[in-house]
Amino acid sequence: MTAPIHFDPTRLAAALARTPGRYPLFIDGKSVEAADGRAIERIGPAHGVVVSRYAHAGPIELDRALAAARRAFDHGPWPKTTAAERARVLHRAADRIEADAELIATLDVLESGKPIAQARAEIAGAVDIWRYAAGLARDLHGDSTTAMGEHKLGIVLRDPIGVVSIITPWNFPFLIVSQKLPFALAAGCTAVVKPSEMTSASTLLLGEILAASGLPDGVCNILAGDGPGIGAPMTSDPRVDMVTFTGSTRVGKATMAAAAPTLKKVVMELGGKNAQVIFPDADMEAAIDAAVFGAFFNAGECCNAGSRLIVHRDCADAFTAGFIAAAARVRVGDPLDEATRVGSLISPQHFDLVTGHIDAARRAGADVVLGGGRLAAATGHFLAPTLVAAADPAMAIARDEVFGPVATLMRFDTPAEAAAIANGIDYGLSASVWSRDFDTCIGLSRQIRAGTIWTNTFMDGAAELPFGGFRQSGLGRELGRNAVADYTEEKTLHLHCGPRTAWWTPRAA
Ligand code: NAD
């Protein structure tokens, strides 16, 4: 019997004292309340108290935000501003985010239940991305060709695509908006941003940061609100040119359908059920540590969670024993405690969904060899790190995104079988291969259909590398050297110089 999770009330009081508590919307360069006075009250999932109140945008604020973004794009200075000036604004924003990092991290912890040490690393990562976007802004180039003959010249321009709707989920509130917004701004686009209604505070704070960094009014507008009422019209409104969405595959499909009548460009970062394939010749200690990290990081509420452990039969028993021993050392606790590695799940409803998956796996005959139940705590939704062993790859627990601290272990005999299990689901976001043999690692990495494949590591990220999914994990990529170009349209200028060959009426002699 483990001791109940300990909360130190002074930590919570200090965190709440650091945060503003109330967050207005940000429209056309100004902080505004909702005309109808509606608000969203967020109860922190770990601590069970109200941690923030945001104005809930209604149709009036939505219309004002879309109109402001459209106006700022069609008539404002931002799309015509030099890349050097755009980069200066983004660098200033990065500096301010860095200066406010502790506040932003605290907001994400209070609203999502994630551990503070991890949230600090996420905000540091976000700062790095804003700076990377500022650098890329200076390197946005079109193309040209002289290969069409002496009298012809082709120039390919890259124009900003226009107004971008940015919709983000609750699991990495500030990091995910940072994977989108700075690149849209670097390209010269304008934006309407809607964070998850459960974790809006850190994104709403960005409004003030951007205004103070010199972003012109109307270029970035930030709304808090629900999905159907605010998110859906952001995807269908004809004033919007592009939608970039991160969230569930279910809502991603609805978003594509809503964007179809006006044929907007859509970029989707969706769900995952990611394989970690372990061969007997791997550095077993490192593989076990990475498997535990991959499965339980962010309480498994992570699109990249390495929730499918595909282990060679020859090392499966030793790996399972090592995984259980390592998982027992993972500190689950108060997210405001520096030592915590796994915090609370996002909501009671989500807790029930995750435990529902575990119960269904038990009923289907899978063996829950670790965890599987609630951890005692005065408040919060803490689930013990869970391992489902001896699973059949056809079982729902081995195929569906659980989005909780639940790993499923399957065994294989041949690399072909490992590839078939890895590829045998609807998702294709990421995977890893663990072996000391080069042929094994590269051979399998090439066979697995996923957007990112790690070799002998897991969930490392870098702004320089593109990120996104195959199949139902998404559409398009974020980050990497094309991240700004993704927010542009190519425009061809086809030039003719010198006498043109007449089509119909020859020149008079
Ligand atoms: P969600 O799909 O429920 O919500 C995501 C966002 O969409 C929220 O802001 C929500 O308000 C909004 N929304 C809801 N209904 C909408 C509608 N009809 N039209 C437009 N917007 C709508 O997802 P979630 O529960 O917040 O996040 C968890 C999911 O996100 C998981 O499936 C996870 O895998 C995925 N995710 C993917 C990535 C990635 O990069 N691939 C990263 C993080 C999370």
Image (tube, grey):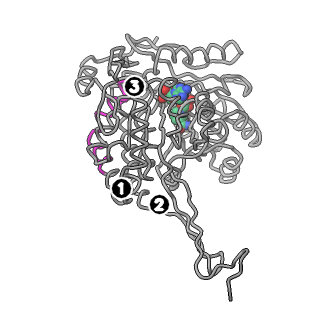
Q: Secondary structure at mark 2?
A: loop
In terms of image quadrants, where is residue 260?
top right
Q: Secondary structure at mark 1?
A: helix
> Which amino acid, by three-letter code, is at mark 3?
Ala
Most extreme residue toward the bottom, as rendered? 509
Foreground mark, 3 or 2, reads 3
Compare marks 1 and 2 and give the one earlier in the sequence: 1
In terms of image quadrants, where is residue 266?
top right
139 displayed left or right of 314: left
Give the residue number, with chain letter if any, for mark 3.
57
The relative height of residue 263 versus residue 385 in the rendered view (above or below) is below
Residue stretch rendered in magenta on the structure: 92-116
> Which amino acid, by three-letter code, is at mark 1?
Ala
Compare marks 3 and 2 and give the one earlier in the sequence: 3
Give the residue number, with chain letter if any, for mark 1.
87
Q: Position of residue 437 (x, y in %)?
A: 66, 51
Would you call the spot at circle 3 few (<14 residues within 10 Å), some (14-19), or many (20 or more)? many
Residue 463 in sight: yes
Q: Position of residue 388 (x, y in %)?
A: 63, 22
Q: Is mark 1 within 8 Å of ligand 1?
A: no
Give the residue number, with chain letter if any, for mark 2.
140
> Which amino acid, by three-letter code, is at mark 2?
Leu
Kindly identify the residue that appears in the image at 71 percent across and 15 percent down.
364
In terms of image quadrants, where is residue 356?
top right
Kindly identify the residue that appears in the image at 45 percent across and 33 percent down.
172
Specify whether residue 507 is painted magenta: no
The relative height of residue 277 versus residue 47 in the rendered view (above or below) is below
Compare marks 3 and 1 and give the one earlier in the sequence: 3
- Separation of disc 3 and disc 1 at Cα? 30 Å
